Amino acid sequence: MKVLVAIKRVIDYNVKVRVKADNSDVDLANVKMAMNPFCEIAVEEAVRLKESGVASEVVVVSVGSKSCEEQIRAAMALGADRGIRIDAEDGPDSLSVAKLLAKVVEQEQPGLVILGKQAIDSDNNQTGQMLAALLNRPQGTFASEVKVEGEQVIVTREIDGGLQTVALDMPAIVTTDLRLNEPRYAKLPDIMKAKRKPLEVKAPADYGVTVASKLSLVSVELPATRQAGIKVASVDELIDKLRNEAKVI
Ligand code: AMP
């Protein structure tokens, strides 16, 4: 069984995000980029399925500019076998990405498609769901456990206040949550080996898809900066301030 993993290049999660002076977008100048953390978890899960003999091949796909080949190579260093980059301006909208992924699925015929539950830049949390709808295939979102049993994949989902387990007929779409696994670090020999693994570059037109967003970004603002706190000398003073200054009790 083949596993297809969709990965996105995003701002590294350690970076303090800046906004452009005109509030038109996030400022990406000289900012460290990385693989979306939920996509790293997706790659790790696919590689584990291969290591346990369940999967025969792991293919990673990313939609974006040439720079996202860095993240495709990173996924191959973690154990993916080959990569596909579909050339597009960075930050394509989720529906275009889902339409392109649907075409890749038609061509590659994977048993399982694994995506992150959300990209930490746009926080959309919709590409996996859109892909499942376009393909008319079952989806197991927010997965904290994935087990392949015969023709089905058993997905434990993190839902509000608990866990839900679903059995999906394959081919199926799975999106990863934080607790699914802890991704490994790439070893130097694997980083070197990844440079020689096949990476195909395609255009959206090769799949008959036009990347055109139906939404435009109006403005981006940073959260309001927190006011400095104060220290109080006693519980009585605290209660007094809460009652008479903050008026919250
Ligand atoms: P989103 O719906 O944008 O929050 O993204 C959810 C998941 O969809 C990501 O974790 C990726 O697995 C996948 N995805 C989103 N954008 C892209 C992209 N440009 N290329 C490949 N996969 C993507």
Image: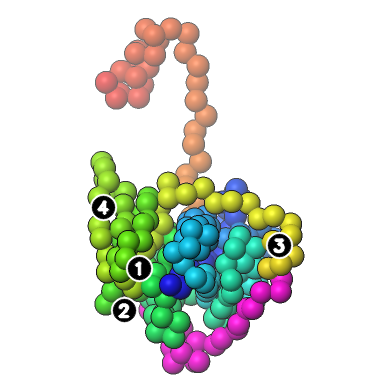
Identify which amino acid the numbered label 4 is placed on.
Answer: Thr
Name the N-terminal-most of marks 3 and 1: 1
Q: Quadrant of the C terminus?
A: top left
Magenta highlight range: 195-219
x then y, percent, for residue 143: 36, 54
Q: Mark 4 points at which residue?
A: 165
Determine the CA span between mark 3 and mark 1.
28 Å
* Residue in the picture at 34% in, 19% down: 242
Determine the CA span between mark 4 and mark 3.
36 Å
Q: Quadrant of the N terminus?
A: bottom left
Q: Name the residue under label 3.
A: 191
Labelled disc at residue 212: none
* Residue in the picture at 47% in, 49% down: 181
Q: Name the residue under label 2.
A: 135
Q: Is mark 1 on a helix, strand or loop?
A: strand
Determine the CA span between mark 3 and mark 2.
34 Å
Q: How crowded is mark 3: few (under 14 residues within 10 Å), some or many (20 or more)?
A: some
Q: Is mark 4 on a helix, strand or loop?
A: strand
Identify which amino acid the numbered label 3 is placed on.
Answer: Ile
- Determine the image quadrant of residue 76: bottom right
Determine the CA span between mark 1 and mark 4.
15 Å
Say if 12 sits above or below 86 in the image: above
x then y, percent, for residue 133: 28, 74
Name the N-terminal-most of marks 2 and 4: 2
Is disc 3 in contact with disc 1, using a CB cutoff of under 8 Å?
A: no
3 vs 2, front mark: 3
x then y, percent, for residue 82: 59, 74
Q: Is mark 2 on a helix, strand or loop?
A: helix
Q: Mark 1 points at which residue?
A: 173
Q: Is residue 244 left or right of residue 22?
A: left
